[in-house]
Image: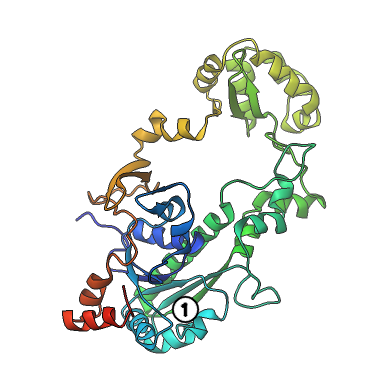
């Protein structure tokens, strides 16, 4: 029967903002039950990151919290902490992104929960890791982009370093976390073993340096800032057609380069010219070759070149605005944008998981929950409290 691979897995999510919530959202997309524990009245900090907003919810919160249930619990009260401990005892995974030491002070540290539930997979997402000289220091995505070298690689050649506008460190770190959690779940199901996973934004930032870091290790110097170009591959970059429309092409292999100059441009001389024949030659003579291409592309409008280059097997595409990309035929055809019914926002347009599964059941994603939307349901169905017990907790303001 069609099913999602993490069906039957329960995740207790005490994270907020982006890195933790995006990690648990990936797990929810794959079928896990995500119980999002929030502070009464205020909830996840990202709920207040607005404008823009819709239905009273901030766009940051809406972006990273689909397929979850929300319970609002005052963890500073003994009764509230007891509820979270009982939920942890009945969960497979626990995710938190407090500063190191805070979870322990709240009574939900790894050692405490391991005694309650030895097979629990406990994932901590922090700024600089659980240990070390920087562990207690706060950190946010743009600071890591600056501190860990990413900004130095971005921007125009003669300009200042520039951060990426998206929270890419949060997002990459969240994917490392969800990968680690999935691996730990597989081992948990096979052996019953639990473990503590320590993932940091610092580690995520350094890890995504990838080939740029290897460039430095190999050459002894950092790769130069190249703007829209690439330091070790030519041609890569944005070009303008005769109508001023920009398109981007990338010829990362010799075959793709030959497709460009021979098939698309009908310029076999550029494949034979010793200055441009091999990749290293083109990199060396970049200042000659790139202006030559700019002159050729200025002869016809953007649409002409995009069609011709694609027909020749050259990776290329128009430089689009964000609205153009989100409403493009190929994105809509792939179902990467969806509309779901939200209790306060109405028809909420949002993204869908890009993970395709051959046996995915025909289930609609659930919208990001309202604060405490599922409090009664979770207390009743998971902790088996009756109406009287739930009413007492509400009266004492332990839950909302």
Looking at the rendering, which quadrant does residue 129 occupy?
A: bottom right
**Residue topped by disc 1:** 195
Question: Which residue reaches farthest top?
Answer: 299
Structure colour scheme? rainbow
Where does the N terminus fall, quadrant-wise?
A: bottom left
Looking at the rendering, which quadrant does residue 78 occupy?
A: bottom left
Q: Which residue is drawn at 38% across and 29% down?
A: 329
Tell me: residue 387, above or below residue 363.
below
Is residue 33 at least partly visible in the picture? no
Where does the C terminus fall, quadrant-wise?
A: bottom left
Question: Which residue reaches farthest front?
Answer: 395
Q: Which residue is drawn at 41% across and 80% down?
A: 75
Is the residue marked by circle 1 packed among few (<14), some (14-19), or many (20+) residues within 10 Å?
Answer: some
Q: In this view, does 297 lie to the left or right of 41?
A: right
Is residue 328 at least partly visible in the picture? yes
Point out residue 217 in the picture as x, y percentages from the top left corner.
Answer: 76, 55
Question: Which residue reaches farthest left?
Answer: 387
Q: Residue at x 49, y 61 (%)?
A: 17
Numbered label tally: 1
Q: Is residue 177 left or right of residue 159?
A: left
Point out residue 96 in the picture as x, y percentages from the top left corner.
Answer: 47, 72
Point out residue 137 in the picture as x, y percentages from the top left corner.
Answer: 66, 72
* Residue sitting nearer the eye, 360 or 166: 166
Q: Which residue is drawn at 39% across and 73% down?
A: 93
Point out residue 226 in the picture as x, y percentages from the top left corner.
Answer: 73, 37
**Label 1 residue SS:** strand
Tell me: residue 135, above or below residue 318.
below
Question: Which residue reaches farthest right?
Answer: 220
Tell me: residue 331, above or below residue 239.
below
* Residue sitting nearer the eye, 394 or 166: 394
């Amino acid at each position: 029967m069609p099913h999602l691979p993490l069906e039957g897995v329960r995740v207790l999510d005490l994270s907020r903002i982006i890195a933790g919530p995006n990690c648990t959202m990936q797990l929810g997309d794959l079928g896990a039950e995500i119980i999002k524990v929030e502070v009464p009245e205020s909830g996840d900090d990202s709920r207040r990151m607005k404008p823009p907003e819709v239905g009273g919810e901030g766009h940051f919160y809406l972006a990273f919290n689909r397929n979850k249930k929300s319970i609002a619990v005052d963890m500073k009260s003994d009764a509230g902490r007891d509820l979270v401990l009982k939920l942890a005892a009945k969960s497979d995974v626990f995710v938190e992104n407090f500063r190191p030491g805070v979870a322990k002070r709240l009574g939900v540290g790894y050692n405490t929960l391991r005694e309650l539930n030895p097979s629990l997979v406990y994932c901590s997402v922090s700024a600089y890791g659980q240990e070390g000289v920087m562990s207690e220091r706060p950190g946010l995505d743009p600071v890591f982009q600056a501190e860990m070298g990413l900004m130095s690689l971005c921007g125009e050649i003669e300009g200042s370093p520039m951060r990426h506008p998206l929270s890419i460190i949060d997002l990459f770190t969240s994917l490392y976390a969800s990968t680690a959690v999935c691996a730990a779940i597989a081992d948990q199901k096979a052996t019953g073993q639990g473990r503590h996973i320590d993932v940091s934004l610092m580690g995520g930032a350094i890890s995504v340096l990838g080939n740029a870091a290897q460039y430095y290790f190999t050459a002894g110097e950092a790769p130069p800032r190249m703007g829209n170009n690439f330091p070790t591959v030519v041609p890569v970059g944005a070009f303008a057609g005769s109508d001023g429309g920009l398109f981007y092409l990338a010829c990362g292999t010799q075959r793709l380069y030959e497709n460009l100059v021979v098939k698309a441009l009908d310029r076999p001389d550029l494949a034979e010219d010793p200055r441009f024949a091999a990749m290293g030659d083109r990199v060396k003579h970049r200042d000659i070759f790139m202006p030559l291409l700019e002159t050729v592309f200025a002869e016809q409008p953007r649409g002409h070149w995009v069609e011709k280059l694609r027909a020749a097997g050259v990776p290329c595409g128009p430089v689009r605005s964000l609205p153009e990309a989100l409403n493009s035929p190929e994105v809509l055809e792939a179902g990467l944008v969806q509309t779901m019914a939200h209790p306060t926002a109405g028809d909420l347009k949002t993204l869908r998981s890009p993970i395709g599964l051959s046996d995915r059941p025909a289930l609609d994603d659930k919208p990001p929950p309202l604060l405490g939307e599922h409090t009664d349901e979770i207390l009743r169905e998971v902790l088996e409290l009756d109406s009287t017990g739930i009413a007492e907790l509400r009266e004492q303001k332990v839950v909302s």
